[in-house]
Structure formats: structure tokens, C-alpha cells
Image (cartoon, rainbow, N blue to C red):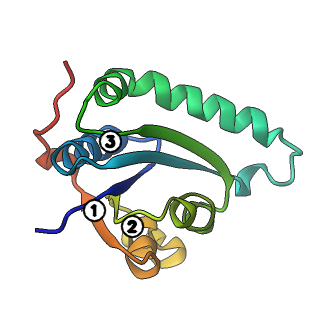
Amino acid sequence: MARYNRIFAALDGAATQEAVARRAFSIAHDNHAEVMLGHVIDSVPYEANGIDFAALTEDGLQRIEDSLEGYLTRARGDECIPSVSVQVRAGRVAETLVETLIDPFDPDLVICGVRGLSNIKYAFVGSVSTQLIRNVKCDVLVVRPETLEDYPQD
């Protein structure tokens, strides 16, 4: 079985986010691996509005910290997980995720969730998980939230 030292978990801010974080922490615990949770706020809807992206990403970071508080506290206190960090950026999702979060972290494993786009939407925009599978230089695990029972929140 592969040993992972650095695990990147791509959070989507939606229903799969908790499952992705739980799986990342479970695998990190078993492998004594560092974990980075990352989220990209899609900048496209805001580009013409002159929005303050620094404030937007700070708000996004706080929302993630709040929504995953129990999991983050447990993982940060887990002696088997050397470090846990959370990063939020704004940009075009797939490119920003890879170029500013995943590549600099240099993970052995990337974990993301499945969102289940309709066939029409998938044909036009693709999926982040498909783009990650095609573009990152390490293993990619796509998590289905309904299959998860490990690393429960206390």
C-alpha cells in the first residue's frame, strides 16, 4: 500500500466538504501525514464588480474553520498528524486550485469530492475532480460522502 506524507484535500464549500475532510484526516492519521485543506472561491461571478477578494477569502476561511471546527480540532490534536492547515484563494477554480494550492504544497495524494453535475452542465464546464485527475502529478481520490464512516467527529 502506498504511503502518503502530504495530503491535500480540495474543499468545495458544499455537502461533500465534510466527507472530504474526514477522509483526509483518516488517511493522514494512518500515514502520519501532513494535511492541507484548500478551497477556491470562483472569481468569475465577481470579476466585473470590483469585489475585495482579500475580504472574500478571509470570510471563506472563517466559514470553513467554523463548519469543520470539530474535525479540525481533533486533527490538530492528533499526534499522528504532524500539521493541519487551511488555505482559501479566489480565482478560476481548477487553475487556481492546482497552480496556487496543490502544486506549491507538493502532495502525495489529492482528495476531492464528487458533486454529480448534470450531463449538460458537465459538458460545458467539466468537473474539478476530472481536471484534478488529469492534471496533478500524484494520486487522486474522489470521495462519495455516502460511503464514509471513518474519522467521526467527537
**Residue on which disc 2 sits:** 129
> Quick one: SS at disc 1?
strand
**1 and 2 marks in contact (CB < 8 Å):** yes
Q: Residue at x 31, y 57 (%)?
A: 5
Task: Pick out the residue farthest to the bottom.
Answer: 134
Q: In x, y percent, where is residue 34?
A: 36, 47
The relative height of residue 60 versus residue 11 in the rendered view (above or below) is above
The quarter of the rendered structure image containing the N terminus is: bottom left
**Residue on which disc 3 sits:** 21
**Mark 2 is on which residue type?**
Ser
Quarter assignment of residue 75:
top left
In whole angstroms, how far apart are the C-alphas of marks 3 and 1? 12 Å
Q: Nearer the viewer, mark 2 or mark 3?
A: 3
**Mark 1 is on which residue type?**
Val
Q: Residue at x 83, y 38 (%)?
A: 52
Nearest to N terminus: mark 1 or mark 2: 2
Q: In this view of the protein, can residue 81 be seen by the observer? A: yes
In whole angstroms, how far apart are the C-alphas of marks 1 and 2? 7 Å
Q: Nearer the viewer, mark 3 or mark 1?
A: 3
**Residue on which disc 1 sits:** 142
Nearest to N terminus: mark 2 or mark 3: 3
Density class for disc 3 (Cα within 10 Å; few <14, some 14-19, many ≥20) is: many
Q: Residue at x 61, y 69 (%)?
A: 95
Q: Between residue 15 and residue 99, name the one nearer to us.
A: 99
